[in-house]
Image: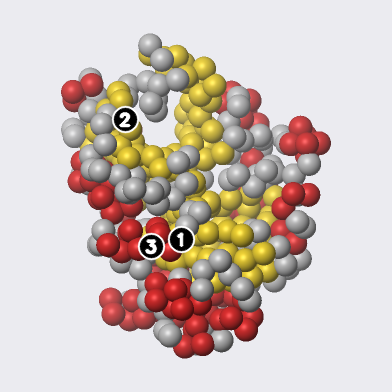
Amino acid sequence: MAATSAHTPAHTRTPDTARQADPFPVKGMDAVVFAVGNAKQAAHYYSSAFGMRLVAYAGPETGSRETAGYVLENGSARFVLLSVIKPATEWGRFLASHVAEHGDGVVDLAIEVPDARAAYAYATAHGARGLAEPYEVTDEHGTVVLAAIATYGSTRHTLVERTRYEGPYLPGYTAAAPLTEPPARRTFQAIDHCVGNVELGRMNEWVAFYNDVMGFTNMKEFVGDDIATEYSALMSKVVADGTLKVKFPINEPAVARKKSQIDEYLEFYGGAGVQHIALATNDIVQTVRTMRAAGVGFLDTPDSYYDTLGEWVGDTRVPIETLRELKILADRDEDGYLLQIFTKPVQDRPTVFFEIIERHGSMGFGKGNFKALFEAIEREQDLRGNL
């Protein structure tokens, strides 16, 4: 693994001077927006299985004749689920065709920015393809400024400036009551990172895109034997904004004996797109127990993984036997350690899945777990007949 700024202790990585000099300042992830076949049913799934809370809705009852939108939150993490009722505009036709081609998937990694006009101007001046020039939307709760640029595949980044808005989500949405009783304790608090899969040979192109268009810097790099098993391999680089609030790992397949998880994703998704969303939790044990009880499937890890785990990970907040029971992975680097686990795909196509991560100092991505994790994914691929 190449030496990167991630080896510097977290508290020294983003001095005030660096923030002030940031050419593309961001406030964080605003929302992960999904295009789905049935937003009402998807909203119920993320409410009951992930413990999220419905907070806003737009549909025919609110004057939205073309699409239905459900907004769910957990801490600062926000999912927006969109489905088409009857396409009438370019946006509605795009959403309908996206679901037809890709299945349920992420169409937008929306980023909150302090100034959407300045962010859009900088991005397009540095090579981004503009999808929507800055415009304002207003209701009784205030005004939001929005703009959008294209990234890999058919994914976009909507740039959201909401400093003058106090509504539940965006103008056009009304506050909504929860669909299910939320769990006693929050299952997760924030979006940690969002991972994109791109075609062979295009990872560096998209890394350069984020470097140039958003001023993001390279945080981590995994190549060669870092992410390889006996059968498959991939390469990955991580880009992040100066404050590390927005982190985007980008994967591409590598030549190997059999089909990698990236190859499988690209085949069934029909091209590049968002592979998984990592959700940060303060208590991964409680989160996994709650989500398992609600029917969420997680990748399995052989007991042998835990036989020597304590020798190289050392002491963690969660005892090794509890990690073994729940199939949670652990990894340690020079800054601390992390605990993580991955769901199985959450739709019929083997595409989008989720990661649950609990960090204790480490800003890594679980390099020590890559072999065990990808062997677990390969077992699932084999069951699907796709290895």
Question: Could you tell me which residue is drawn at 66 percent across and 34 percent down?
Answer: 25
Return the mark for residue 284.
1
Q: Amino acid at mark 2?
A: Ala
Q: Amino acid at mark 3?
A: Val
Name the residue furthest right: 17
Which x, y percent locates residue 286?
40, 59
- Of the two numbered discs 2 and 3 on the same chain, state the one appearing first in sequence: 2
Q: Are marks 3 and 1 in contact (CB under 8 Å)?
A: yes
Alpha-carbon neighbours of circle 2 within 10 Å: few (<14), some, or many (≥20)? Answer: many
Look at the picture and state if 371 lies above or below 144: below
Question: Could you tell me which residue is drawn at 64 percent across and 47 percent down?
Answer: 244
Return the mark for residue 56.
2
Name the residue furthest top: 140
Return the mark for residue 49.
none
Return the mark for residue 288.
3
Quadrant in which residue 176 is drawn: top left
